[in-house]
Image (cartoon, rainbow, N blue to C red):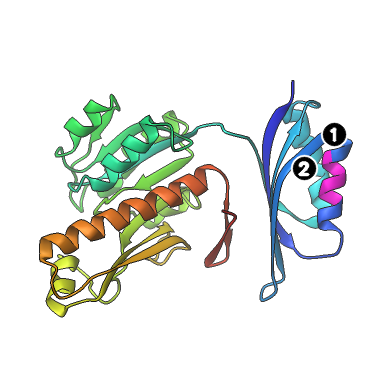
């Protein structure tokens, strides 16, 4: 019986990479079902995502063999089983639109994730998590207790073998230490008004200024606040006739859609980090 795999690679570009990878897969009696590649001429980096079926050898043996194959190319690479749900934890505060959207898409089978828990610094969304029978962990904290609380939160992530953390409108800044531990596997969503409308009540600020579009940005979490590699963005047009409530509703809808796409692409191993940017094989 064949196993379907996803292979992603990143390395300095050189002649023959695609040919060599194809040859490796063929030598393993594998068959390529889907392949995408990108050559960044500015950095000289090459990126590739390959979906292939292979009956022999086992994935553990395949991983060992590819490790040796990749050494001359100095590749960064990952090998995953196709369509395997990614263990995920959602961080939230009080606003529930992104949490509700992700829980619904997950339960409906539209996302290749397995939501193991919801973590929050408020109890407001505990009933929503209970509705979907997802464990809810409440962690109130102060600046003095932040380090201890993050240590407990990270224990949950480790115990659940979490591969993805989603800050689904979690209104707390992660410490540099936790950002480092979650590098490349934590996604945040925020409104695209940053940095124009910083601080509290960005939609109120935007409405007061009469913005003509609202949007959202999903990006990887880094120690630089809202400066991580961008995965997805979108905007929606607005006009003078919209009330503040209509603007907020439209903005929340855009946030949900952008975050869902980012989570979907990450869980399908379609996103490769390229310095301060990303390569997304849609």
Nearest the eye: 242 or 38: 242
Q: In which quarter of the image is residue 129?
A: top left
Nearest the eye: 149 or 212: 212
Span highlighted in magenta in the image: 20-25
Residue 30: x percent and y percent? 81, 35
In the rendered image of this protein, does residue 156 appear above or below residue 71?
Answer: above
Look at the image and say whether residue 21 sits in the magenta stretch: yes
Relative to 190, 199 lies left or right? left
Look at the image and say whether residue 157 sits in the magenta stretch: no
Outermost top residue = 1
First in residue order: circle 1 vs circle 2 = 1
In the rendered image of this protein, does residue 131 appear above or below residue 65?
Answer: above
What's the residue at 51%, 48% (across, down)?
A: 265
Relative to 87, 239 lies left or right? left
Q: Is residue 225 visible?
A: no
- Name the dominant secondary structure of the magenta segment: helix
What's the residue at 51%, 42% (across, down)?
A: 267
Residue 142: x percent and y percent? 17, 50
Q: Name the residue under label 2.
A: 67
Circle 2 SS class? helix
Residue 36: x percent and y percent? 68, 54
Circle 1 SS class? loop
Q: Quadrant of residue 113?
A: top left
Q: Name the residue under label 1.
A: 28
What's the residue at 45%, 38% (across, down)?
A: 111
């Amino acid at each position: 019986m064949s196993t379907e795999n996803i292979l992603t690679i990143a390395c300095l570009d050189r002649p023959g990479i695609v040919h060599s990878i194809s040859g490796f897969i063929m030598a393993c009696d594998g068959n390529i079902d889907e392949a995408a590649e990108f050559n960044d001429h500015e950095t000289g980096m090459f990126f590739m995502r390959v979906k292939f079926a292979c009956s022999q050898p086992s994935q553990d043996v395949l991983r060992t063999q590819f490790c040796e194959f990749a050494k001359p190319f100095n590749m960064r690479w990952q090998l995953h089983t196709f369509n395997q749900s990614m263990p995920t934890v959602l961080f939230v505060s009080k606003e529930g639109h992104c949490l509700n959207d992700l829980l619904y898409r997950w339960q409906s089978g539209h996302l290749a994730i397995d939501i193991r828990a919801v973590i929050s610094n408020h109890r407001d969304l505990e009933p929503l998590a209970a509705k979907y029978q997802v464990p809810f962990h409440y962690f109130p904290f102060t600046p003095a207790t932040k380090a201890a609380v993050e240590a407990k939160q990270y224990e949950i992530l480790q115990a659940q073998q979490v591969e993805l953390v989603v800050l689904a409108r979690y209104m707390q800044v992660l410490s540099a230490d936790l950002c480092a531990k979650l590098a490349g596997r934590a996604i945040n969503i925020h409104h695209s008004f940053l940095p124009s409308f910083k601080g509290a009540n960005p939609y109120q600020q935007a409405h007061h200024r009469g913005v003509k579009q609202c949007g959202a940005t999903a990006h990887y979490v880094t120690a630089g606040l809202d400066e991580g590699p961008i995965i997805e963005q979108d905007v929606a047009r607005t006009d003078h006739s919209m009330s503040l409530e209509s603007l907020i509703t439209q903005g929340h809808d855009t946030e949900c859609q952008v975050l869902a796409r980012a989570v979907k692409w990450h869980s399908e191993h379609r996103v490769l980090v390229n310095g301060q940017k990303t390569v997304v094989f849609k």
